[in-house]
Image (cartoon, grey):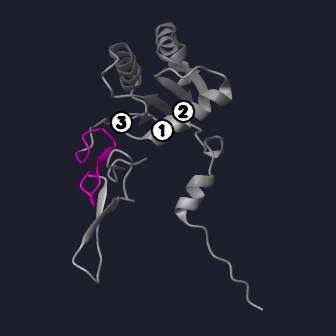
Amino acid sequence: MWLNVTAPTVSSIRRNVKPELTLEFGRIVIYTTSFRVVRTTFERCELVRKIFSNHRVKFLEKNIALDCEYGKDLEERCKRVGEPLSLPVVFIDGHYLGGAEKILDMNESGELQDRLAKIEKLQHPHTCQTCGGFAFVPCPMCHGSKLSVFRNCFTDSFKALKCTWCNENGLQPCSSCSQ
């Protein structure tokens, strides 16, 4: 008697993994935005990014303007810890640390440097040559159009379908600097 067991696909595993189950020990995750429409929010995100860059620590920046999955993840995490959703938001070791004001206060008091002692340091910080530091590149399948041209083998007609390789902005994570 043979059991017919199929292995789970990567996409099914990703859908079932909850953010609380992902291990973030020794990691800094910063949720930011690159939208410049609301200037104060953008400036606060830049300030937090510069503070961590000046400490020369390795951090993962999740720009919610480039991928809506980051926004959903942030909303769920903030709801879980009972904090309002306001960018930027910093998590260290998977624990909520705070926003721009809290990070600035901790930086000025020296408390942030103590918290960053166990975080991996960057020896030679550099900007990725592939994506320019944005961590996303245009989709190579649809070239950022978000459409996949499907040709029917039986007729000469083309149908435009949604590209399944990229996100809602026509972007994919950069393979050169993925973490």
Q: Is residue 151 left or right of residue 97?
A: left
State whether residue 143 is above or below residue 66: below
Determine whether the residue tagged by mark 1 lies in a helix, strand or loop: helix
Which of pointers 2 and 3 indicates the residue nearer the eye? 2
Q: Residue at x 43, y 47 (%)?
A: 179
Please state which amino acid type lies under the numbered disc 2. Answer: Leu
Q: Is residue 111 left or right of residue 56?
A: right
Q: CA distance from mark 2 to mark 3?
A: 29 Å
Q: CA distance from mark 1 to mark 3?
A: 28 Å
Residue in front for this viewpoint, 117 or 170 = 170
Residues packed near mark 2 inside 10 Å, few (<14), some (14 to 19) or many (20 plus): many
- What percent of the width, then of the height, locates residue 79? 64, 28
Residue 74 is labelled as 2
Q: Is residue 27 left or right of residue 150?
A: right
Is the C-beta separation of discs 2 and 1 under 8 Å? yes
Residue 70 is labelled as 1
Q: CA distance from mark 2 to mark 1?
A: 6 Å
Please state which amino acid type lies under the numbered disc 3. Answer: Gln
Residue in front for this viewpoint, 123 or 15 = 15
State whether residue 11 is above or below residue 43: below
Prevailing secondary structure of the magenta residues = loop
Chain part drawn in magenta = 129-145
- What percent of the width, then of the height, locates residue 72? 53, 37
Residue 123 is labelled as 3
Q: Is residue 154 left or right of residue 21?
A: left
Q: How many marks?
A: 3
- What percent of the width, then of the height, locates residue 44? 39, 16
Please state which amino acid type lies under the numbered disc 1. Answer: Tyr
Residues packed near mark 1 inside 10 Å, few (<14), some (14 to 19) or many (20 plus): some
Q: Quadrant of residue 80?
A: top right
